């Protein structure tokens, strides 16, 4: 079905200016849950916007392929021959399951418990640096620091290289942004970041083969799939996925979560009074912010959804009012939540550890300027003004003498849309 709704549903410029297009998503769910989109400069696609349809497609690996197209991008950004990286987000069964299981030993309850002290130290150290400040850039000093540090710690990246990883991940994700291009083209910028990743992780993998440690890089560098070592390109792809996806999604959830609490001070007060609400509050933050807002699947011949023939699709979240005390139901904060090994553990765990400490200490924060959304249409989450923190840029929150917390809503956020 064709629709009058425009390209704002996947337009990064719209996202950067106005935030999520909730009204358009709501219209599509009500009137055109399977809608065809095509325009010059964009690869056409079917937009699937109802939860049940999206869930069914995500689980149906027999009829819907993960590769070759993982998200809706401008045609100039689409890969031509092969994906620039081959990892879990563009890998179909049986490879997907085999590669996903390589790190399963690191995500058992016992293994995660061993990481608790290290994660706690990172969070405490980060918050201690800003505890006495009256004004701070939340994205730069907290939201961007904690997830990158946690995943770098788990990977086994030396602390001295953490900022280098942050810069490379921002460059790879923001290759279309002039801030990271330095006079180069989009393709040249992305390729430069890819090559730096390859060189860096190649050296680190070789070091872990010589001297193994208890970290992700040691496990992956010495792992085998089908009786053979992981090809070097796929090995680097795995590292990049962990660094980029683990950093980006949790950063956006954290900054978006703070904005949500500033908009809803009663919810923040509940959390201050009862920190045991943190687990459900974090799950709601992930659902509410929806760090990943669209993903693609490629239909095999003769596949269909809701009795209409389909080709590819994107997912959109349903935004609705709820609270930290509400028991979570079957909603998801990411269109690809089921495809990544650590999706149910690592991001939420670091968010929980951050949230407990931050909510106890954030007695008087307000927004100094309006917050805006990330300027990439595949990822979301609020960030601070004047620029998009999902791209590593942000603004400032300020403590108020009266102990209040509040501030203007981010553009396009509004109150809860259906």
Image (tube, grey):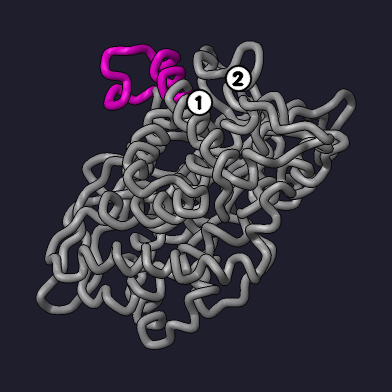
Q: Is residue 116 magenta?
A: no
Quarter residue 229 falls in: top right
Q: Is residue 273 above or below residue 237?
A: below
255 left or right of 215 in image: left
293 left or right of 146 in image: right
Residue on which the image places disc 1: 198
Q: Is residue 264 above or below residue 53?
A: below
Quarter residue 14 falls in: top left
Magenta stretch bounds: 176-194
Q: CA distance from mark 2 to mark 1?
A: 35 Å
Q: Quadrant of the N terminus?
A: top right
9 left or right of 106 in image: left
Label 2, secondary structure: give it.
strand
Viewer-proximal residue among 382 and 197? 197
Q: Residue at x 36, y 44 (%)?
A: 162
Q: Quadrant of the C terminus?
A: bottom right
Residue on which the image places disc 2: 38
Q: Is residue 14 visible?
A: no
Q: Residue furthest bottom?
A: 273
């Amino acid at each position: 079905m064709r629709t009058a709704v425009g390209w704002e549903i996947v337009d990064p410029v719209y996202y950067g200016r106005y935030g999520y297009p909730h009204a358009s998503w709501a219209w599509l769910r009500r009137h055109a849950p399977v809608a065809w989109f095509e325009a010059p400069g964009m690869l056409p696609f079917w937009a699937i916007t109802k939860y049940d349809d999206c869930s069914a497609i995500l689980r149906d690996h027999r009829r819907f392929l993960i590769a070759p197209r993982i998200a809706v991008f401008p045609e100039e950004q689409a890969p031509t021959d092969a994906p620039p990286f081959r990892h879990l987000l563009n890998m179909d069964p049986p490879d997907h399951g085999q590669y996903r299981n390589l790190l399963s030993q690191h995500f058992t309850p016992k293994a995660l418990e061993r990481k608790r002290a290290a994660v706690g130290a990172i969070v405490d150290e980060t918050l201690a640096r800003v505890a006495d400040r009256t004004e701070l850039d939340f994205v730069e000093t907290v939201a961007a620091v904690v997830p990158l540090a946690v995943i770098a710690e788990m990977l086994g990246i030396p602390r001295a290289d953490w900022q280098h990883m942050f810069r490379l991940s921002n460059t790879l994700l923001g290759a279309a942004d002039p801030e990271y291009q330095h006079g180069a083209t989009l393709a040249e910028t992305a390729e430069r970041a890819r090559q730096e990743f390859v060189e860096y992780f190649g050296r680190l993998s070789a070091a872990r083969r010589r001297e193994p440690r208890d970290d992700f890089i040691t496990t992956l560098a010495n792992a085998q799939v089908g009786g053979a070592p992981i090809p070097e390109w796929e090995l680097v792809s795995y590292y990049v996925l962990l660094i980029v996806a683990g950093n980006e999604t949790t950063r956006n959830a954290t900054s978006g979560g703070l904005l949500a609490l500033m908009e809803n001070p009663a919810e923040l007060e509940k959390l201050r009074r009862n920190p045991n609400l943190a687990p459900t509050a974090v799950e709601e933050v992930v659902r509410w912010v929806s760090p990943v807002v669209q993903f693609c699947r490629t239909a095999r011949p003769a596949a269909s959804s809701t009795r209409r023939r389909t080709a590819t699709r994107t997912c959109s979240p349903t935004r609705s009012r709820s609270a930290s005390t509400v028991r979570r139901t079957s909603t998801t904060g990411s269109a690809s939540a089921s495809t990544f090994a650590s999706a149910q553990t690592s991001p939420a765990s670091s968010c929980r550890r951050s949230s407990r400490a931050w909510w106890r200490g954030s007695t008087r924060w307000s927004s100094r300027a309006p917050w805006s959304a990330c300027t990439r249409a595949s990822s979301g989450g609020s960030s601070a003004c004047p620029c998009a923190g999902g791209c590593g840029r942000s603004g400032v929150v300020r403590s108020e003498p009266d102990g209040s917390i509040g501030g203007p809503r981010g553009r396009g956020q509004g109150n809860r849309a259906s």
